[in-house]
Amino acid sequence: MRVLILGGIKDAAELTAKVVNIPGIEAIASLAGRTHNPSIPVGNVRIGGFGGVTGLVNYLRQMQIDLLIDATHPFASQISENAIAAAREVRIPHLMLIRPPWQQVNGDRWIEVENSEVAAATLENQAQRVFLTVGRQELSAFADLEKIWFLMRMIDPPSADAVIPPGMILCDRGPFALDNEREILIHHNIDTIVSKNSGGNATYAKIIAARELGLQVVMVNRPATPPGEQVTTVDGALAWLLEKLDSDRT
């Protein structure tokens, strides 16, 4: 059986590494290619978009894909919708690997918002120095906040003609250690963090550091999860794969 794993989160690489060792299953990992130096999973890898639902359908048929696993970023809603439509079109089983969102705990000071535009409006008159960790594609939403200084962390720098808010760009890739996150917040005198609720452990240290320092967090909630089969862990995805493999053999 041949499975296509749509990547975007660390779990996708971990899943691919485990699948390649399962006899009877061939895995192909697909990365969107939005970062210049992505972490490449082991095994067969393709990089780049498909060209919407039609392009994905054509690829699934051309490569004779039997199973489709969507392990993209929780905020990559368009590719997830495309995956559902394409799997339905070619009539193959489809699974979403969705890591759970972070939950507030005692000591957190969250303001939950629906998107970056609302996050920007929330900051006005409430913040002076902001740690902005929503990715380079969302920077323009904050560009009009000229009275706020931003420390903007992302994997790759924005393009030369990008519209960005005032402040400093910090290019780095997780996972991030708690001591490092705490030092950044203190050194830059940060009073507010803006973050997407991505879940997972790679970037959660900044939330812990904010809790320890009593800082406000403007948390951008995820888009609605589309309907379909879901698991929350790599082990859950492996169990689903093995079940499909057993069914195929019988």
Image (cartoon, rainbow, N blue to C red):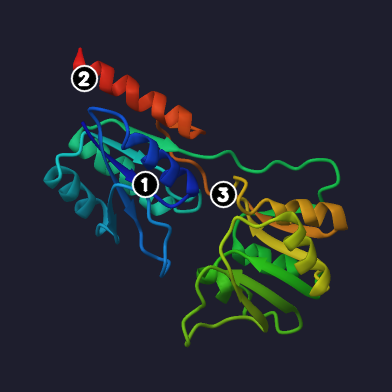
Q: Which quadrant would residue 191 be assigned to in this image?
A: bottom right
Inter-mark Cα distance, 1 to 2: 26 Å
Front residue of 240 and 57: 240
User: Residue placed at 77% from the left, 51% from the top?
Assistant: 208
User: Residue placed at 54% from the left, 83% from the top?
Assistant: 163
Q: Is residue 41 above or below residue 186?
A: above
Mark in the foreground, 1 or 2: 2
Task: Describe residue 201's horizontal placement relative to residue 43 as left or right.
Answer: right
Q: Is residue 39 above or below residue 72?
A: below
Mark in the foreground, 2 or 3: 2
What x and y, as percent, mark residue 83? 32, 44
**Neighbours of disc 3 within 10 Å: few (<14), some (14-19), many (20+):** some
Inter-mark Cα distance, 3 to 1: 14 Å
C-beta proximity under 8 Å, tags 3 and 1: no
- Compare marks 3 and 1 and give the one earlier in the sequence: 1
Residue found at the very far left of the displayed protein: 62
Location of mark 2 (residue): 248
**Neighbours of disc 1 within 10 Å: few (<14), some (14-19), many (20+):** some
Residue found at the very far bottom of the displayed protein: 161
Inter-mark Cα distance, 2 to 3: 35 Å
Residue 222: numbered disc: 3
Task: Describe residue 162's horizontal placement relative to residue 185 as left or right.
Answer: left
Q: Quadrant of the C terminus?
A: top left
Location of mark 1 (residue): 81
User: Residue placed at 62% from the left, 80% from the top?
Assistant: 143
What x and y, as percent, mark residue 98? 49, 39
Residue type at mark 3 is: Arg
